[in-house]
Amino acid sequence: MSVLIKPIITEKMTADSELYNRYGFFVNPKANKIQIKEAVEATYGVSVDKVRTMNYGPSRKSRYTKTGVQHGKTSGYKKAIVDIAEGENIDFYSNL
């Protein structure tokens, strides 16, 4: 099971990383906080202080068209916000 799916690179998360040493990741929905902490430490070589997780459910929508009612949904995901130790940082752009 791959724990980390991809990092979240948005304006808000970039500002958090510069101010508070906080980084966001999309993670496997079955992963717990201990597994996320170990995966971040192993992948990026930093020490993790705190892990916070959020589960987002799928959002469902329906549209009325000429051919009838169209139903659709987005997939659900789990997001983790990771606080790392003071003085350390993660550079997502180094291996592009």
Image: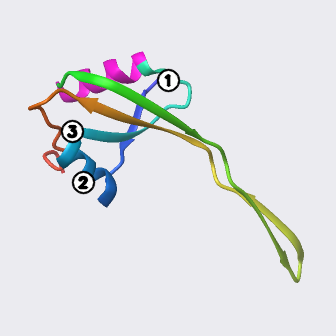
Residue shown at 89%/78% (left/top)? 67
Q: Which residue is mark 3?
A: 21
Q: Which residues are magenta?
A: 34-45
- Front residue of this view, candidates 54 and 36: 54
Is 40 contained in the magenta span?
A: yes
Residue 26 drawn above or below residue 13: above
Say which amino acid is labelled 2. Ala
Of marks 3 and 1, which one's residue comes earlier in the chain?
Answer: 3
* Residue at (25% x, 27% y) in the render: 43
Q: Residue at x 88, y 83 (%)?
A: 66
Q: Residue furthest left?
A: 87
Distance (Cα) linking label 3 and label 1: 22 Å
Amino acid carrying label 3: it is Asn
Q: Secondary structure at mark 1?
A: loop
Label 2 with label 1: CB-CB less than 8 Å: no
Residue 41 percent across, percent down from the top left = 25, 22
Sequence order check: which comes first, mark 3 or mark 2? 2
Query: What residue is disc 1 on?
Result: 31
- Asked whether residue 35 is drawn in magenta, I would say yes
**Quadrant in the rendering for residue 77:** top right
Left or right placement of residue 1 versus residue 69 in this view: left
Q: Which residue is more in the foreground, 17 or 2?
A: 17
Q: Where is mark 2, residue-wise?
A: 15
- Residue 86: image quadrant is top left
Q: Judge whether 77 appears above or below 14 on screen.
A: above
Residue sitting at 47 percent across and 32 percent down? 53
Image side of residue 82 versus residue 70, left or right: left
Q: CA distance from mark 2 to mark 1?
A: 26 Å
* Most common SS among magenta residues: helix
Disc count in the image?
3
Please provide percent x and percent y for residue 29: 55, 31
**Label 2 or label 1, whichever comes before in sequence order:** 2
